[in-house]
Every structure is written in C-alpha cells, then in structure tokens.
Image: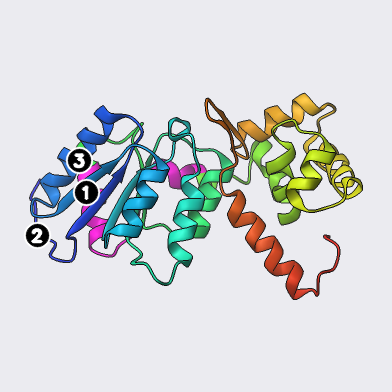
Amino acid sequence: MEVSEFPCIRCILILKADRLHAEALRQYTLRVFPRAHVMTALTVELARTALAAHPIDLFVTGAGVSLESDVLDLLDQCAHNSSSHYPRVLVVTVRREYRMLVALRALAVDGVFDSATEPPDQFMTALQAVANGKRYWSQTIVDHMHQVGSGSTALFRLLTAFEHLVLSVIGDGCDNTVAAAELHLSPATVSTVRRELHRKLGVQHRGELVRVAAQHGFVRFTSAGVVRPGFAMMREAYQARRAKRGGDAPP
C-alpha cells in the first residue's frame, strides 16, 4: 500500500480500551501518517480530556462494551462544542446494534470500520479516505443498515423518539418511579409508555423488555454499571422538541 502525506492531519487520538489493540491501531495509523503525533486513550474520560486539551485532527475510536462508557455521547459533545476543534472521526467496531448504528449515522461520523470482517490493510485505506475528507463505511455495515427494515428490528421503526428515550431508561429493569425521576416525568407517564412498549415490542414481562433493550443496544451492562448509548443525545433532542411545543406533555 502506498503511503502518502497528509499535512492537515497533525494530531491523532486513538480510543481503545484494550492496550494491545490500541497499540496495534497506533502502529497502523503511523504507517499512514508517519509525521503525525499519535496519542492513545484507554478510557472515555481520558479521551475527553485529550480532546479538550489538544487540537485533534483525527479521532479513531472503538465503540465496544469494554470502554464501559458512552462513546456516542462523547462524539455528540464534541460536535456541539463550538469552542473546540472538531476532528474527523473513524469508528472501529465489531458491534452492530440498532441503536449504535442509527446514532452514528445521525452524528454523521466520517467512517465506520468493521474490524470483524475487514483486514488491517483496509483499515489504512479507511484512514486515508477519512483524512481526505471522504466517508468510509464498511460494506458489511452498510448492508446491515439496509436490512434494518426487515426482521425484528423493523419493529423499532414503530417507536417514537420519546419511546426510544424511555426505553433507554427502563431497559435496565428499573421501576416506574426511578425512571420517572431520571426523565423528570410522572410515574404515570412512564407507566403508560411502558405498556405501549410492551405492546409494540411484543413482550409480556419486565425481563423480556430488558433483554430486547440490551439486544438492540439501548442499554449495556458493564462492570462499571449501566451504560445507555446515545442517551444524552436523545434526551437533548426530546427536550428541544418539547420546548418548541411550549412544554406540552410528551406524545
């Protein structure tokens, strides 16, 4: 593979929880950008600090459960922080949960690389594409997104944005009172939405709802606790719509 110079890419950050994988990504990245300063972070908080402290030009990040925090909300914060330099973003993942892929598409990240199916040399191709201002989404990821309308995932198209938000909270198995406090709603409202989710998703019990929420990426259970990928994004969007309606009750 021919390696070219990218003068616009001077500082690169790699976020990967596994030190060995982070170093492997760093070595491949240096083959494409030999003159760049490449940093690695093993946690979301360390990455957040690096993004705030340095003018990162390219951010390469994993999105797996091993990070035990929410990469989606970190990317959303970067995109909406006008005081910071927003880098080009390449997500490296083997995960294909509905919630994560939809959020990445909404965030308009520059690339999503499927490390489960594509070889390392193709990772360098993805880096080059993103550095050149192009989008790179692995074909396997694109094909999977095209299949979202089929099978069980199609059911999620029936859910409203508000129901997505509530599912991200009650998907950890909490009761209506706890969820209401988290969402600043009444327990009665949460109960109503819960019943509608049970109906739409075809589940009967709380445990089944938790299973469906985890399977599709609305919640993750980690050693550090429950992570709700993209929850802050969904809540912010809901609050903006509610404010626009003049604070009316949720649909």
Residue, x 31% and y 52% (percent of image)? 50
Relative to residue 122, is residue 172 depicted above or below?
Answer: above
Corner quadrant of residue 154:
top right
Predominant SS along the magenta part: helix
Q: Secondary structure at mark 2?
A: loop
In the shown orientation, is residue 243 left or right of residue 40?
A: right
Residue, x 45% and y 47% (percent of image)? 142
* Front position in the image: 9 or 153: 9
Residue picked out by circle 1: 125
Residue picked out by circle 2: 5
Residue, x 35% and y 59% (percent of image)? 52
Corner quadrant of residue 141:
top left
User: Within 10 Å of the Cα at label 2, are there few (<14), some (14-19), or many (20+) other Cα atoms?
Assistant: few
Answer whether residue 199 is magenta in the image: no
Residue picked out by circle 3: 26
Disc number lying in front (1 or 3): 3
